[in-house]
């Protein structure tokens, strides 16, 4: 991903016509510091299972987008990942639903990836529930044997 210094300029309050209380947009972090920030945030805020899955996904996405030359795509990519990092840091992501507008903008491939992610999460939850049931059933079996 090529980084253009003019794209990473400091934030201004351009377009802030809705009053003095509208915050200026945050300056975009360059790709490598943003990547490191995301991985560090995963390490601090996520459980091990979510961290492993999240780290793999982040690494794959940054690798896939490293050769992008279109400035609009670069800005979109970096701004979305920066908002993600801020959400993870603030724990605002838990129980949050995706905007319908974002889903409508996704390509078929992106929707397919989102579906695969959902399936992986459901599979992991089922495996964890089965393991928990097996762990809870073992003491009951031991208790029945000792009662006999």
Image: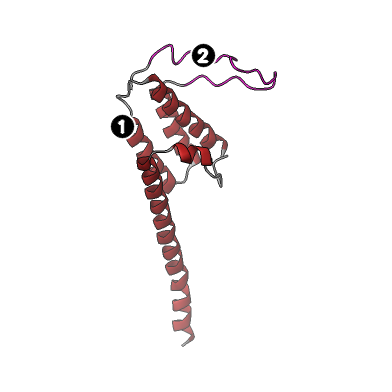
Dot 2 falls on a residue whose secondary structure is loop
Magenta segment, which residues? 4-28
Residue 22 position, x and y percent, is 65, 22
The residue at 42%/28% (across/down) is: 77
Residue 37 position, x and y percent, is 45, 29
Dot 2 alpha-carbon crowd within 10 angstroms: few under 14, some 14 to 19, many 20 or more: few
Residue 10 got which mark?
Answer: 2
Residue 109 position, x and y percent, is 35, 41
Q: Is residue 5 magenta?
A: yes
Does the magenta stretch mainly form a helix, a strand or a loop? loop
| Chain-order first, disc 1 or disc 2 | 2
Position of the N terminus by quadrant: top left
The residue at 38%/14% (across/down) is: 4
Which colouring convention does the figure follow?
secondary structure
**How far is disc 1 from disc 2 in space, using C-alphas?**
26 Å
Dot 1 falls on a residue whose secondary structure is helix
Q: Quadrant of residue 137?
A: bottom left
Q: Which residue is mark 1?
A: 64
Residue 21 got which mark?
Answer: none
């Amino acid at each position: 991903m090529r980084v253009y210094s003019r794209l990473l300029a400091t934030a201004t309050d351009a377009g802030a016509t809705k009053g003095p209380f509208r915050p200026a947009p945050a300056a975009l972090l360059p790709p490598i510091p943003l990547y490191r920030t995301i991985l560090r945030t995963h390490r601090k805020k996520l459980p091990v299972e979510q961290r492993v899955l999240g780290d793999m996904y982040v690494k794959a996405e940054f690798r896939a987008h490293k050769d992008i030359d279109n400035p609009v795509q670069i800005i979109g990519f970096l701004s979305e990942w920066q908002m993600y990092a801020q959400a993870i840091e603030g724990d605002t992501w838990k129980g949050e639903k995706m905007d319908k507008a974002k889903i409508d903008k996704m390509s078929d491939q992106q929707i397919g990836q989102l579906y695969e992610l959902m399936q992986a999460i459901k599979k992991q939850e089922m495996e964890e529930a089965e393991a928990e049931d097996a762990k809870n059933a073992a003491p009951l079996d031991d208790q029945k044997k000792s009662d006999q």
